[in-house]
Image (cartoon, rainbow, N blue to C red):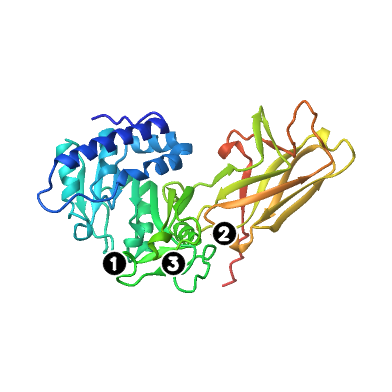
Amino acid sequence: MPFRIPESPEAFLSSAQELWVKLKDEKKKTQLAEGDWYPFDTLSCVPTVTELISPEFDVVAADIAGRPVADIGCADGDLAMLFAGWGADVDAIDYAPNNFNRMLGVRTLSRVLDLPVRTYDINLDHDFKLPQDSYGLTLFLGILYHLKNPYAVLERLAFQTRWCILSTRIAQVTPTVRARVENEPIAYLADGREIGNDATNYWVFSASGLFRILQRTRWAIVASKRIGCLVDSSPIDPQGDERMFVLLKSRVHFPELHVRPADGWHAPEGSFRWTAKSFALEVVLPLEKPFSGFSLSIFVPRQIVQAGQAVSLSCRIRDQLVGTAEYAASGFYEFDGELPPFALHEPVLRLDFTVESEFVSDESDGRELGICIPVDASGENGLGFRLLTSPQSPAPNP
């Protein structure tokens, strides 16, 4: 069957809704030989997944067109069937002793829908290797907090898949003293029956803890969304259940620098792009390289210095000043900044720039104009942004 993913996020969502109706009917009229169907609606996550992948839809679609898809922690394989129905090469993976019906559900659905989904019984808490050497996309939904060794599994996945959609439970406060942990990179270890009387629940991360472990295990966080209890979520309270969905890009398969405009950018105009007086860049740093700073190519137009007043440009990371410069004449410049040690561990590094000038744009324009960024057709997103490496220490004399 040729691979034909829906042509847009809207069609992606519509296709999933059609399958939801079909699966509901099939499960109603098909009795499993042993046990029952998984009681939760797996496809209920598709609107959130669609929202996550929408900005990267064409890129992700192209990446999985010629590579397999893995559905890990597949339950009855509803999502595996969705991709298989589009002609994707799909592996449905779970650990049978912990699967609700010992994987009979996913095997039955594959048969009754006549979809060639391969099923694998794999224990991720033991030394494992996925069936294929390289996947275009891995679905990893609701499984992370069921793992004893989440760090090892996440790192292994980064070597075997290009993209990953992950969801897991997170918490903002601790259960007893209600200590706030939202901004601390930590995880709560549940006891054997503390969460839903389920001994396979282990680690519930804070949002910062989840981002930290993803960054440390070679992932770039492309997009994220939180659902459920968004105020004072708890690791064990059923009413305090919050979930984080994350679109991840493997930094093993995509080791290059990623930089994208965030707030305060106007549309490109030929060979340059105006910013507002406050603008930002989001940067994913390549791993394990000794970066000390960054450089951004800028252009100071004549009109913003005509009044004889110098134009100043400054940059902050988490409110810490990392670079500043003044320009009294029109021309091209390189704005340099330093990277503080904490910045090297950010999953997505945000650089906030501020332009101070007396220039006010013409009323007919209506835009707030800060400074110009030359468009570099050879650079990522057309921006002349580059990282500066730390100077190497001289080797000692023998």
Which comes sooner in the sequence, label 2 or label 3?
3
Is 370 rendered above or below residue 177? above
Q: Label 1 crowding class (10 Å Cα cut-off): few <14, some 14-19, many 20+?
A: few
Q: Is residue 237 left or right of residue 89?
A: right
Task: Tell which tag, 2 or 3, sits nearer the viewer.
Answer: 3
Residue type, mark 2 in image? Leu
Count of marks overlaid on the render: 3
The residue sitting at 66% across, 40% down in the picture is 264
Which comes sooner in the sequence, label 1 or label 3?
3
Residue 9 location (% of width, % of height):
42, 33
Q: Which mark is residue 344?
A: 2
The residue sitting at 61% across, 65% down in the picture is 393
Is 9 rendered above or below residue 123? above
Task: Tell which tag, 2 or 1, sits nearer the viewer.
Answer: 1
Q: Which mark is residue 243?
A: none
The residue under label 3 is: 187
Q: CA distance from mark 2 to mark 3?
A: 21 Å
Residue 131 in view (yes/no): no
Q: Which mark is residue 197?
A: 1
Q: Is residue 224 left or right of residue 92?
A: right
Residue type, mark 1 in image? Asn
Q: Is residue 366 left or right of residue 143?
A: right
